Image (cartoon, helix red, strand yellow):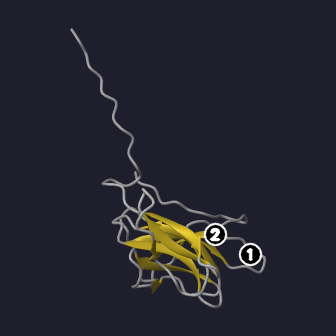
Amino acid sequence: MVVLLYAQPAEANYPGKPGKIAYLGYDGNHLQIYTIKPDGGGKLPVTDNGAANDFPAYSPNGKRIAYSGYDGNDTEIFTINVGGGGRLNVTDNTADDFYPSYSPSGKRIAYSYDPGAGADSEIYTINLDGGGKRPVTDNATNDYDPYWGRQ
């Protein structure tokens, strides 16, 4: 009797074909978000707003990117179409908001909320329209960089 075993190939975090890579690039003045094909072709600027942008995160359906962006007063969470345009302000407060991560359903974003002035950073979640803000952590230490995984 002969038994053949087949090792499954490794899979990425999201099912489907590999898409473009989102990354930060310096435009000569600020960090902006770009996308590029895995082979290095098709570089596309997603943001170009005269302000610093950080921490891009793809939505589960691959149609939008969440990121941290400076709004002239502090850093907020925004979403934008992967081709640029359609920018939406998700958080709007007097704190700095960083490290967005979409929920697997794509309906909420987890992020770090840093009120400054000696207060510690906590993890919050929020609806894509900016409503339903909820604390996840509440302690006396800084909490950063949430990643919303799948189960």
Taking depth in this image into account, of 70 and 41 the one nearest to the observer is 41
Assign a secondary structure to mark 2. strand
Residue 63 located left or right of residue 137: left
Indicate whether 68 appears above or below 71.
above
Where is residue 29? Give x, y as percent.
65, 82
Residue with the mark numbered 1: 119
Q: Quadrant of the N terminus?
A: top left
Amino acid under disc 1: Ala
The part of the image, by quadrant, that contains residue 142 is bottom right
Horizontally, residue 29 falls left or right of residue 86, namely right
Percent x, y of residue 77: 53, 78
Identify the residue shown where x is 41% and y is 80%: 84
The x, y position of residue 25, in whole percent, is 57, 71
- Amino acid type, residue under disc 2 in the picture: Glu
Residue 99 visible (yes or no): no
Q: Which mark is residue 122?
A: 2
Of 98 and 108, the residue lying toward us = 98
Disc 1 is placed on an element classified as loop
As drawn, is 8 to the left or to the right of 65?
left
